[in-house]
Amino acid sequence: MIVRFHTRFGQLTMHGDAAVALLQAMGHTGTVPGAILAADLPAARASLERTLEKVGGLPSGPPQAAAADDEEDERDREPVVTLRTRAVPLLELMRTAIDRKSDLMWERA
């Protein structure tokens, strides 16, 4: 699943697993589609930032399968992307929405 977040002032697309994890970190159920009203965005952003302080360094996707100790396997392995890294564009979109008093909505893309 792919999730598209949008406000009146911008949008971004994110892989579903990371999107749901970030929605839950905001205090939302993680259901898609959904929305957070402009008045509730500061609290949702604060909740997301608190959660990222605790678990933001964890990988955002499914754990990679254990590979043999072969150097070639190490080179071929995708780099680990943390939840904090995945959250950066969403945090920026939320900041803009808060500044401009816009709702945040999301849906399947």
Image (spheres, rainbow, N blue to C red):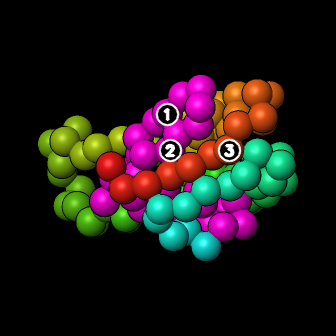
Which residues are drawn in magenta? 1-28
Residue depicted at 36% across the width and 41% down the height: 79
Quadrant in which the N terminus appears: bottom left
Q: Residue at x 59, y 31 (%)?
A: 8
**Residue underneath mark 2:** 5
Dividing the picture into quarters, in which one does residue 17 lie? bottom left
Q: Nearer the viewer, mark 3 or mark 1?
A: 3
Q: Which mark is residue 21?
A: none
Q: Which residue is mark 3?
A: 103
Q: Left or right: 73 with respect to 57? A: left
Q: Is residue 87 left or right of residue 71?
A: right
> How far across and down, in percent of the image, does residue 70 sit?
18, 51
Mark closer to the chain start, 2 or 1? 2
Q: Earlier in the sequence, mark 3 or mark 1?
A: 1
Q: Earlier in the sequence, mark 2 or mark 3?
A: 2
Q: Which residue is rendered at x = 49% and y = 33% of the image? A: 11
* SS of the residue under disc 2: strand
Q: Three-letter amino acid code at disc 1? A: Gln
Q: Which is closer to the viewer, label 2 or label 3?
A: 3
Q: What amino acid is labelled 2 in the image?
A: Phe
Label 2: how many residues lie within 10 Å, few (<14), some (14-19) or many (20+)? many
Within-10-Å neighbours for mark 1: few <14, some 14–19, many 20+: some
**Alpha carbon distance from label 3 to label 1:** 12 Å
Residue under pointer 1: 11
How many numbered discs, if any? Answer: 3
Establish if 36 lies above or below 84: below
